[in-house]
Image: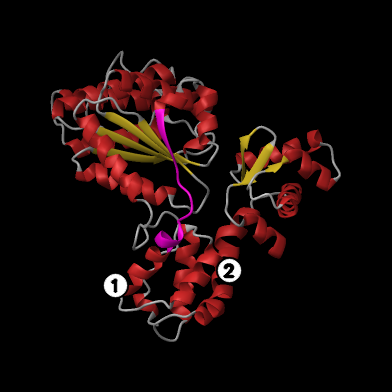
Amino acid sequence: MDPIRNPYAPGAGQRPPELAGRDEQLDAFDVVLERVARGRPERSIVLTGLRGVGKTVLLNALRSAAVRAGWGTGKLEARPEQSLRRPLASAVHQAVRELGAAGGTGDQALGVVRAFAQREPAGGAKGGTARLRDRWNPGIGVPAAVGRADSGDIEIDLVELLSDLGGMAADTGRGIAVFVDEMQDLEPDDVSALCAACHEISQARLPVIVVGAGLPHLPAVLSASKSYSERLFRYSRIDRLDRAAADAALVLPAEEEGAAYAPEALEALYATTGGYPYFIQAYGKAVWDLAPASPMTAADVAVAAPEAESELAVGFFGSRFERATPGEREYLRAMADVAAALHDGTDAVPTADVAAHLGRKPQSLSPARDALLKKGLIYSGERGRIAFTVPHFGRYLRENA
């Protein structure tokens, strides 16, 4: 097969040639956009799922839908220990530019955005007082507003910022959508502020929505911040694809290039990938490159599997494993062993079982567990249980680490 014509895209956040299995989320978002534009009550949206299920790809697809609807959009990626102010200011600045609101309310909104951005202390999220020369310039030509979104309290400022932007968007007859990737990495004060702002704009029925994406424990992070967050967002769990969608993700791009799969090849690929979108792209690419001709067969899948697994071992699994310290790696291996021994069909394992497997007291393992949680290698969806954020990570650890 000609590698130049290989249609598959196993990259982080790269849109696959066929976005299969996500029609429900895309159709629902179109309804949300139309309802908000008409002043109907709607909730902001939170997408959750493991690494490699396509949350970022879907987030970008939803943003494209908002752009097609004439909305102003902006996107940011949350990072641990980074204040929300600057990335959010940059995102909403782009949204205002996309709306093309010039003069009058547009300039007023930009002045509020600049005031919000420049109120960041020199010490960042840690606090402190900003000196003039330390202030970040967001590239906005109008003067910063005074007395609006510049109090220094992130919750007050964010509510005022999104309220003013919502008023400006309403004047244009359109809306603003802010997309937040890796939402679970926001600082606690920023999570609280974002929830409060979403609550305010929802009550006022302003044409502003926030679309967040994050790991499976994101709903728990939001709930710990504001008790009403369970009713504030529309939650959508993004999971692996069913067999029909997984086949479509492989077959349709191949057909565009005049190629095909034998039925047994598709069966073998689904058994190997488990329906996880990233794995589908990785194995699809390897099979295409190594198959001698179309239609691609189960034998081609068997030949290509080691190539795909080798690449995943370095770029997808290995890069994450290397971030862990020796003590943390020991904890990860124990999780993998316990999960294999349980055979209960669940992804999460009891922390007490991990401690027993290592012959240690649970309290002595708290530093390693907490560090892995902060690094995003594991998550806790319920008290006393933990799971890998990466699908098939346990299998990788048992076979390679």
Residue 239 painted magenta: yes
Residue placed farthest to the top in the image? Answer: 147
Residue 203 position in % (x across, y down): 31, 18
Whether residue 137 is visible here, answered yes or no, is: no
Of pointers 2 and 1, the one earlier in the residue sequence: 1
* Left or right of 38, for residue 184: right
Nearer-the-camera pick, 111 or 283 = 283
**What kind of residue is marked 1?**
Glu
**In the rendering, at what x and y percent does residue 48 appear?**
47, 41
Magenta span: 233-246
Position of residue 356 relative to residue 283, above or below, is: above
Quadrant including the N terminus:
bottom left
The residue sitting at 37% across, 64% down in the picture is 248
- The amino acid on which the numbered mark 2 sits, given as a three-letter code, is Glu
Residue 309, disc: 2
Which residue is identified by label 1?
256
Q: Vertical placement of 320 versus 107: above or below?
A: below
At horizontal 47% and vertical 19% (from top left) the residue drawn is: 129
Reply above or below: 190 against 324: above
